[in-house]
Image (spheres, grey):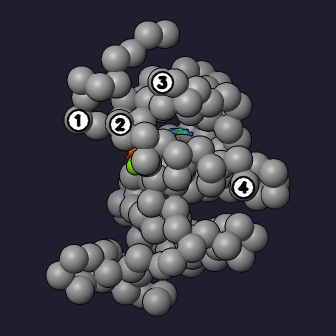
């Protein structure tokens, strides 16, 4: 699979039955996400995809396909469960995912998974540039 990442404005995702190919837009975001996955996989943290392969040349991550995105309604109805998963990832890895939205949560066989660790950081980033909570999830719990 050849992809010219330099022409793009967003990450490029290719979905396969078992794998997700994520060509990252920038080297910086690629590195943050790659390093987080390497750490989290080593610690066997659950409720997030496994990283199967990565290419530093192509800024490519090949991840476990963890199912379908949840809907905003499902998100609102399952905040408590999602919060527990988020906190567990933080407690085990030391990193906050920092981008909790329905788009970044998948469901497979009734199990929830957090994805998209480009903003993973040891600091919690719950406010936007205007100083407001980024969304209702952060407002409710932090
Ligand atoms: N491991 C995965 N399993 C299933 N779907 C995924 C996976 N990774 C990404 N996706 C799908 O691709 C979309 C974009 O991926 P994401 O990692 O969130 O990139 P972006 O930083 O562009 O938001 C997600 O919202 C999700 O629908
Ligand atoms: Mg995303």
Q: Badge 1: few (under 14), some or many (20 or more) residues near its Cα, within 10 Å?
A: few
Nearer-N-terminus badge (4/3): 4
Asked if residue 130 shows in the view, the reply is yes
Work out whether residue 102 or residue 92 is closer to the camera in this orientation and state it.
Answer: 92
Q: Given the current orientation, which residue lies at the most extreme top position?
A: 1
Dots 4, 3 in contact, CB < 8 A? no
Residue at the image point whose x is 51% and y is 78% from the top: 123
Residue at the image point whose x is 37% and y is 40% from the top: 26
Which type of secondary structure does the marked residue at label 1 adopt?
Answer: loop
Q: Which residue, given by chain and number where applicable, does mark 4 sit on? A: 40
Answer left or right for 17 relative to 104. Answer: right
Dots 4, 1 in contact, CB < 8 A? no
Dots 2, 1 in contact, CB < 8 A? yes
Nearer-N-terminus badge (3/1): 1
Q: Which residue, given by chain and number where applicable, does mark 1 sit on? A: 9
Nearer-N-terminus badge (3/2): 2
Nearer-N-terminus badge (2/1): 1
Residue at the image point whose x is 44% and y is 10% from the top: 2
Q: Given this view, does label 3 or label 1 mark the residue nearer the observer?
A: 3
Mark 4 vs ligand 1: CB below 8 Å: no
Nearer-N-terminus badge (4/2): 2
Q: Badge 2: few (under 14), some or many (20 or more) residues near its Cα, within 10 Å?
A: some
Give the spatial CA distance, label 4 vs label 2.
22 Å
Give the spatial CA distance, label 3 vs label 2.
10 Å
* Mark carried by residue 58: 3
When the figure is inspected, residue 121 is found, relative to residue 41, above or below; the finding is below
Q: Given this view, does label 4 or label 3 mark the residue nearer the observer?
A: 3
When the figure is inspected, residue 74 is found, relative to residue 25, above or below; the finding is below
Q: Which residue, given by chain and number where applicable, does mark 2 sit on? A: 25
Picture coordinates of residue 132, whole percent (x, y) = 24, 85
Q: Quadrant of ligand 1?
A: top left
């Amino acid at each position: 699979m050849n992809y010219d990442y330099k022409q793009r404005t967003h990450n490029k995702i290719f979905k396969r039955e078992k794998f997700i190919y994520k060509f990252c837009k920038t080297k910086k975001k690629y590195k943050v996400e790659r390093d987080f996955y390497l750490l989290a996989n080593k610690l066997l943290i659950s409720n997030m995809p496994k990283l199967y392969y990565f290419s530093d040349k192509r800024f490519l991550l090949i991840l476990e396909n963890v199912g379908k995105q949840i809907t905003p309604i499902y998100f609102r109805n399952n905040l408590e469960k999602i919060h527990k998963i988020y906190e567990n990832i933080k407690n085990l890895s030391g990193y906050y995912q920092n981008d909790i939205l329905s788009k970044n949560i998948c469901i497979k066989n009734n199990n929830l998974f957090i994805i998209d660790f480009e903003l993973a950081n040891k600091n919690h980033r719950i406010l936007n540039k205007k100083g407001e909570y980024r969304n209702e999830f952060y407002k409710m719990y932090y």
